[in-house]
Amino acid sequence: GTESWSLKNLRKYDNNKANYVSTFSGDLEDETDIGKEIRMMEAMFHVSAPTQIYKHWLNAILYFIFNDEDFTPRDFRDKLYTLACTYMSDIYLADDRVDFEDIIYKNDFRAINHTWNLNYLDQGCDVPNFVFNFYDYIIWSQSRSKYSKFEFTYRTSVEHFYPQYPMPGYENLKDKGLDSFGNLCLIRRGMNSKFSNNMPKAKVENFGNIDEIKNGLSLKLLEMMDIVRDKNEWGETEIAEFGKLAKERLKNAITK
């Protein structure tokens, strides 16, 4: 009866009735912390690669389960997280990218590249969706109570928080961090026309103060909106400072 992602297991009872319980806790409603982490990461992978042809992560996890019948929920959680970090290290931040098949079948999910090119994060709309979703997972995992209503959804459009084509009278930041990671966010494609050319303060007023909309925004975008509320400004300085912080978070998460 909800639109949230779930991981359910069919349980049959003595009276010939059946129900769906949470896979990793055995309870009808609740799930363990590890179970929730697994659910969130699987949703993160899925919305980043929704079509079957690119669903290498699912192939990887099925391969892991097939070869390790005695895995625990913690093993499963750790394998998903390792795979996410290897995606970042060997694909999205690597000069010499590793094939998905090699990550799965040759390298046991472990990264072989440990020199990251963070310039790949400053490529405007060319930054892959997975990078933003992985960042959101990091923020969620560190602040679960604050973002308890967050769910991964099909946010597939990379947008500039400070617009590419600002309204008359506003500075164009083309060579001042416009395309850097600190100014980019992921939104639902249907929000494009309403979101794109508004200035950051207007975006906060129009999208950041209505719960129905706010609960569907990415955590990275919510963080950027919080900075606007705090400083009443979003420009070259704020973009650079937030971009540096966001990159450090990604590096720390991958290192972990």
Image (cartoon, rainbow, N blue to C red):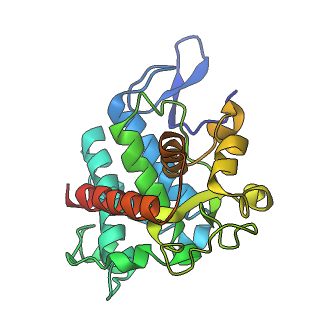
The picture quadrant where one finds residue 244 is: bottom left
Q: Position of residue 42 (x, y in %)?
A: 46, 50
State whether residue 212 is above or below residue 100: above
For residue 72, say whether it is visible: no
Q: As drawn, which residue projects farthest toward the top?
A: 15
Q: Residue 249: percent from the left, percent from the top?
A: 30, 55
Q: Nearer the viewer, residue 187 or 52?
A: 187
Q: Position of residue 78 (x, y in %)?
A: 27, 49
88 sits to left or right of 190 = left
Q: In this picture, is 54 found above or below 94?
A: above
Q: Quick one: which residue is furthest to the front in this view?
A: 169
Q: Quadrant of residue 161?
A: bottom right
Closer-to-camera residue (76/68): 76
* Residue that appears at 31% across and 47% down: 76
Judging depth in this view, the residue of 251 and 61 nearest the camera is 251
Residue name at image x 48 percent, y 30 percent: 148
Task: Give the residue at x 40% y 65%.
Answer: 240
Viewer-proximal residue among 253 and 31? 253
Q: Position of residue 58 (x, y in %)?
A: 46, 60
143 displayed left or right of 29: left
Tell whether 43 sits left or right of 241: right
Query: At x 77% / y 56%, what residue is drawn?
Result: 190
Q: Is residue 201 above or below residue 246?
A: above
The quarter in which the N terminus is drawn is top right
Q: For residue 75, say whether it is visible.
A: yes
The count of marks equals 0
Kindly give the residue lying farthest to the bottom in the view shown. Answer: 96
Which quadrant of the figure contains the C terminus?
bottom left
